Image (spheres, helix red, strand yellow):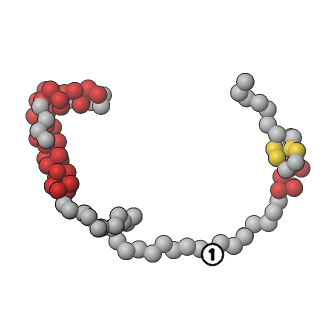
Amino acid sequence: MALSSEQIEQLARLSRLALPDEAVDATRIQLDSIFGIIAQMQAVDTTGIEPMSHPQELAARLRDDIITETDRRAAFQAVAPQAEAGLYLVPKVIE
């Protein structure tokens, strides 16, 4: 996909980038190169290949799911300005 200089200038304007006139051609060449690489990658047949979450085979280190803190809900609600039925009551902020 070849871009024109006008398209590069429009992209710069939409991106709110100050792109000097002398940099337009260099930017166009770089973007054309990037789009060429993307086209090569899209041409690869990936039928039957499962997506990977990581490029390496890594096992996630998981910790044991154990309770380490005591239940202090009653103590926290005792010092709350307003609590009812185990819930904290707050002022209405949206009409």
Q: Quadrant of the N terminus?
A: top left
Q: Quadrant of the C terminus?
A: top right
Q: Residue at x 82, y 40 (%)?
A: 89
Return the residue nearer the eye: 39 or 66. Answer: 39
Asked where in the image residue 64 lies, by quadrant, the reply is bottom right
Number of disc labels: 1
Q: Residue at x 81, y 63 (%)?
A: 71
Mark 1, secondary structure of its residue: loop
Asked where in the image residue 67 lies, by quadrant, the reply is bottom right
Residue 10 at what x, y percent from top left? 22, 27
Return the residue nearer the eye: 22 or 9. Answer: 9
In the displayed structure, 16 sits above or below 80; it is above
Q: Which residue is mark 1?
A: 64
Q: Residue at x 14, y 49 (%)?
A: 36
Residue 63 at what x, y percent from top left? 59, 74
Which residue, as the protein is rendered here, is positioned at the far top? Answer: 95
Identify the amino acid type marked 1: Asp
Q: Is residue 22 visible?
A: yes
Residue 5 at what x, y percent from top left? 12, 29
In the displayed structure, 3 sits above or below 83; it is above
Q: Is residue 18 left or right of residue 74?
A: left
Q: Is residue 85 left or right of residue 22?
A: right
Q: Residue at x 39, y 64 (%)?
A: 53
Determine crowd level at label 1: few under 14, some 14-19, many 20+ residues with C-alpha closer than 10 A. few
Return the residue nearer the eye: 62 or 75. Answer: 62
Which residue, as the protein is rendered here, is positioned at the far front? Answer: 47
Q: Is residue 30 visible?
A: no
Q: Is residue 49 left or right of residue 62?
A: left
Residue 16 at what x, y percent from top left? 30, 28
